[in-house]
Amino acid sequence: MSTLVSRAVMNLLSRQCATPCHWRPSVMTLKTSLPLRAEPTKKKKIDPKREQARKERLKKKLKKMEKVAPELIPIEDFVTPVKYSDELSVRMLPQVPFEESERRALLLKEWSRYKLSQHKAEMAAIGQALQAQREALQELKLESEELYWAALRPDPVLFPFHHQGPSYTPPKDKYQPPEGKYSDITKVYTQ
Amino acid sequence: MAAPTCKMVARPLRKFLTCVSGTCLQNNAYRRLSLATPGSNVVKSSEPGVHAVSPWKLHGAVCLQRLPVITKDLSPLEEEFNKLMHQMELERSLLSEHELRLLEDAERMSRKQEADYDSDEEDVADQDILTAQDMEDAWEQKRRQFQPAPRLNEPSDMDRSSADRCLGDSLLLLVKQRVGSEELWLLPHLQWEAGETLRQTAERALCSLPGADFKATFLGNTPCGVYKYKFPKAIRTESSVGAKIFFFKALLSSSNPSPTQREAFAWVKKSELQNYLKPEYLNQVDRFFISI
């Protein structure tokens, strides 16, 4: 049935168009679409040379770039920002009167005397404590050698020793500190 | 007197033995030597500690300290000096960014109030809807919302048995113990038993306190002080003349006192120690209990 139809169509076509049309493939041939007709590109012989030449050019460029010394990373602390260069932020306060400066000098002297006495008291207390320990060890030695050597052994569990020092207010029980969030804006430089 | 003669006898004997046992095995020689010279070896082979039984009884005691939790109140001189330091720091400082912003905002406000104010002249980019003063007010409000715990707690200060009294000073734990015929306020102590170190005795003394469990960190194996006393003449014998109490320092980390045994404990400051301890005992304890 189909062959009859195709033959009829062929006769019709041959009668109507004398010149063959190249954009419309003939009915007898296989219906091939573009992907079916595709072929892998053939490598030409001159290409490896081109590839090598390209690689060498890139390598030369890299060498030139490497010869130049790398840019040093700036140290942020040593660079004064520009906004601090002008004298905008000088605090204007009245000059200290003579009596006030006298009072301050006397107070500073009083303070140094107070601190000296405090230091002497501290040193004396520490000296006394050490003397008490020395005497205790002497008494222990008189008693028993074994206990004496056991007392002199270092304690491995004690260090690292941590202690929370005194604060201004005592700790609040069942206190939830607020959660803080921060965004890190430090500049990261790569060489 | 016995020792030198023993040595004098042992030396020619040892020489004889070494000559004889030159050909024998080493072990035999040593064994013979040890048999031949009993006098010199007796002390080493017996218990390495005590040569003769000491007439002093050993006790281990614990000096449990609760370190200060808050800073002390400043004395008048310290207050004045503190104020002076703040004033001098203020005078020598520059204006901070926040203060500069405050000044700028104040200036801008004053310019706005003027009659010939032209808003187009302003740099719109610099302006913020929220001024520095507004931000300061918001921060102040937030600060007022937080209530810190009070520094001074009067009722707790009076209660001698609570460890939370006098938060600015370091406190020492005292217990009432029966010694001989009388009850005395002492640092907790126990008699030393053979086979343990004195520090272990002190730890036992702390654990065996009835009614309360204290978690403490002992500061090393060395005793910090000693108190030596002789027993009254009635009890004194040849073998027990008196007792030596060795104190070990410990720092309190946490405590859960039960309410029943409150009369037995006292947490005292250095200045209150004289009300509790006997004079001689106090002298010794004062030396190592540092509270500045």
Image (tube, grey):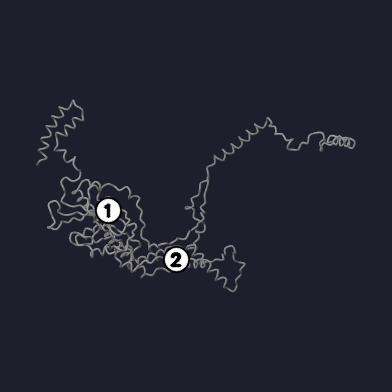
Which is nearer the eye, A6 or B173? A6
Mark 2 or mark 1, which is nearer the start of the sequence? 2
Q: Which residue is mark 1?
A: B204
Residue A38 position, x and y percent, is 73, 35
What is the chain letter for disc 2? B
Q: Label 1 amino acid?
A: Arg
* Residue found farthest to the front: A1
Q: Label 2 amino acid?
A: Phe
Q: Which mark is residue B53?
A: none
Task: Bin the neighbour count of mark 1 within 10 Å (Cα to Cα): few under 14, some 14-19, many 20 and up.
Answer: some
Q: Secondary structure at mark 2?
A: loop
Residue at (21, 58) in percent of width and height: B284
- Mark 1, mark 2: which one is toward the viewer? 1
Residue at (82, 34) in percent of width and height: A28
Let me know if residue B292 appears in the view. no
Residue B274 position, x and y percent, is 23, 64
Query: Which quadrant: the N terminus of chain A?
Result: top right
Residue B271 position, x and y percent, is 26, 64
